Amino acid sequence: MPESQNTEWKVKWRDEYLEWICGFANAQGGRIYIGCDDDGNIVGVAGARKLLEDIPNKIRDTMGIIVGVNLLVQGDREYIEINVPSYPIGISCKGVYYYRSGSTKQTLTGPALEAFLMRKRGATWDNLPLPAFSLDDVDDGIIAQFKQWAAKKGRIDKSVLGESKGTLMEKLHLMNGAYLTNAAMLLFSKDPEKWQLGAYVKIGYFETDADLIYQDEVHGSILEQIDKIVELVYLKYMRAKITYEGMQRIERYFVPEDALREALLNALCHKQYQSGVPVQISVYADRLYIANCGCLPESWTLENLMQKHASSPYNPNIAHVFYLAGFIESWGRGVEKICSACQKDGVPQPEYTINPGDIMIKFVAPESRVIRPAIDRVTNKVTDRVTKKVTEKEEKLLALIVEDPGYTMPQLAGKLKVSRKSIAAWIKRLKEENIIERVGSARNGYWRVVEASRHENTKE
């Protein structure tokens, strides 16, 4: 049987295994067996009865905890079982905190350690008081926008929406004693990075993992970031596969908008903001990644995440305001909604990768929705006979027509930075050569690359 979250096999005892015991105590608890090989086969251990006395003393002296240490026998082989309970407080081994994650031992430092200790105390980072952030820093425009969202959704009593700014913060649970909290700062400040580094989102377009072509950053209140990100991703970073049914133009992206929006909301709600690392969105022609510093709820696995589960937000106060604004549900249905949106749109299910310090979701494009670089598309779609007949400028024009058959002459002129007269002349020649044709009217129709369609029909 392989090692797991709660089981570890060791052939013989080493004092360094005290760190593993510390990791179990800080996580879900577990058992370490001394005298077993990596597959769990019992090989026995020398001096088992002495270890039965030594191990509990070493654990007590280094960590101050008591665990169960038992002598087990199989045939003529003796081995040791160390049964470690999960502790409600943080446990250190010689001043260092360890944590069991999967079958590995993680050393907790920096923001990860801070977040771990807060969880053990029943506190959350988003509810910590931020004395440097005052009501004067709460933006009236964002407050007004939130009230519109909340009133429309009907999840908050209308009388609360008429309260003063300070009273509203209290009613939204964004006060800790006399102070506003980290959640209040992230939600209702125009510039949260003034108080917390990394409170923004980075977006990059990659040709390969090593080739970043262009990038953007989205700043401001996390309430306002969502719409900005979605708009930017669809307008600049992703290209729609454009088809026509009769005269109706159909645009299909490889990530459904509902799935992208829900994935972004999950990232912003569950992010460990104290890490100082922004949410990162990496876009390729055939895939999209969203990565953020975060972790699953304690004792959860990827399997728990993909199944029906209760809501357990890492930042409950942020999630509460998102819920009141109508951005999310309170039933832990985010992953379910993402998968449902992908299934409904006929694209592959998302893939999740859970690492000790971050969570990443990957959307993959079906081949039918992959749009390659413009020149490659012309080469693929137009036969050699056609490409030999066009000039370099006409080839660029063809690339745009393949990209979006609905482009108008003014749009084509703007993209190629030439006059409408030049576009008209090139289009006239391409039509005379029977390379392109116009389908429908000048106002409501679209272009079709004649040789491309013939070539595709031949291939079929």
Image (cartoon, helix red, strand yellow):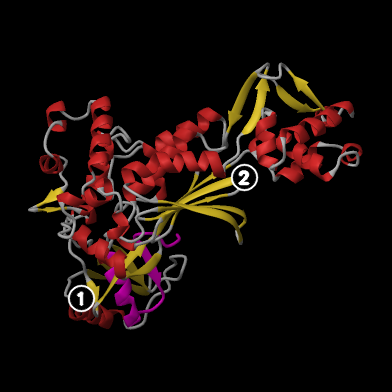
Q: Of the residues shown, which amino acid type is indicated by label 1? A: Met
Pointer 1: residues within 10 angstroms few (<14), some, or many (20+)?
some
Task: Name the residue that disc number 2 marks.
Answer: 286
Q: Position of residue 199 (x, y in %)?
A: 34, 55
The magenta-colored residue range is 1-24
Label 1 sits on a secondary structure element that is: helix
Q: Nearer the viewer, residue 63 or 81?
A: 63
Q: Is residue 10 magenta?
A: yes
Taking depth in this image into account, of 404 and 421 the one nearest to the observer is 421
Q: Which residue is mark 1?
A: 63
> Quick check: can you spot residue 367?
no
The answer to whether residue 376 is left or right of residue 359 is right
Q: Quadrant of the C terminus?
A: top right
Q: How many marks?
A: 2
Q: Position of residue 287 (x, y in %)?
A: 58, 46
> Which quadrant of the figure has residue 428?
top right
Q: Residue at x 77, y 22 (%)?
A: 438
- Name which residue type carries label 2: Asp
